[in-house]
Amino acid sequence: GAVVSQHPSWVICKSGTSVKIECRSLDFQATTMFWYRQFPKQSLMLMATSNEGSKATYEQGVEKDKFLINHASLTLSTLTVTSAHPEDSSFYICSAPTSGVAREQFFGPGTRLTVL
Amino acid sequence: AQKVTQAQTEISVVEKEDVTLDCVYETRDTTYYLFWYKQPPSGELVFLIRRNSFDEQNEISGRYSWNFQKSTSSFNFTITASQVVDSAVYFCALSSYNTDKLIFGTGTRLQVFP
């Protein structure tokens, strides 16, 4: 089946630094990708929709200047957490739907971000 | 507004017991999709099932079965003869028919003891 990868799988950074997380669809093209955030023992919350060739669409309450999303190609979306703070520590998961009638959505393995 | 409620925060069973995870949803859409995902300790989401709102047939896949009741807006998940490997957090999710955005429930943590 289709595979979505994320890199890195985990990252530890100091407060104030920026962290970039990549989401790749490995064997299919995705004009849209989604970024979710999951705090410990909580549910997944949609942060934004990444659109290839245009601006990302952010969910209410998500700071677009803090969470920069770039969908540079049909197989790559990046999420940059700028000036990270301890409260940004979370599990970030991306997903990408395939196209066509038999549309399916595939999730990446997630990236665990710890901000010290 | 769309909403998914999983009232059971945590369930503990002994191996071989049957267990049902409840899911109740709210949506104004007439067409929509419902999903169940499993999240083991590794964190990676494992897709279990997708059901569209037109199809109320119950589904069985091995030890797993799903009961979709549109009249009560419920999409419950039953594991028969549970095993230790079933221990995980299970999420129910909802999406509109014309979008791939998923609204997740709060999840149910299932612990199966030997």
Image (cartoon, coloured by chain):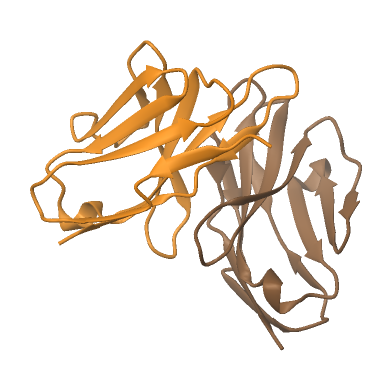
Q: Nearer the viewer, residue A34 or A112?
A: A112
Above or below, A112 relative to A62: below
As drawn, the residue found furthest toward the left would be: A16
User: Which chain gets the brown colouring?
Assistant: B
Q: Is residue A66 left or right of residue A25?
A: left
Q: Is residue B55 left or right of residue A8?
A: right
As drawn, the residue found furthest toward the bottom would be: B114
x and y percentages locating residue B31 in the rendered image: 73, 26
Q: Is residue B61 left or right of residue A74?
A: right
Q: Nearer the viewer, residue A8 or B47?
A: A8
Residue at screen point 67% across, 31% down = A104
Residue B19 shows in the view: yes
x and y percentages locating residue B44 in the rendered image: 53, 54
- Quadrant location, the C terminus of chain A: bottom left
- Quadrant location, the N terminus of chain A: top right
Q: Is residue B45 left or right of residue B47?
A: left
x and y percentages locating residue A112 in the rendered image: 35, 55
As drawn, the residue found furthest toward the top would be: A53
Residue at screen point 82% across, 47% down = B68
User: Which chain gets the orange colouring?
Assistant: A
Residue B27 shows in the view: no
Residue at screen point 52% across, 67% down = B41
Above or below, A13 relative to B80: above
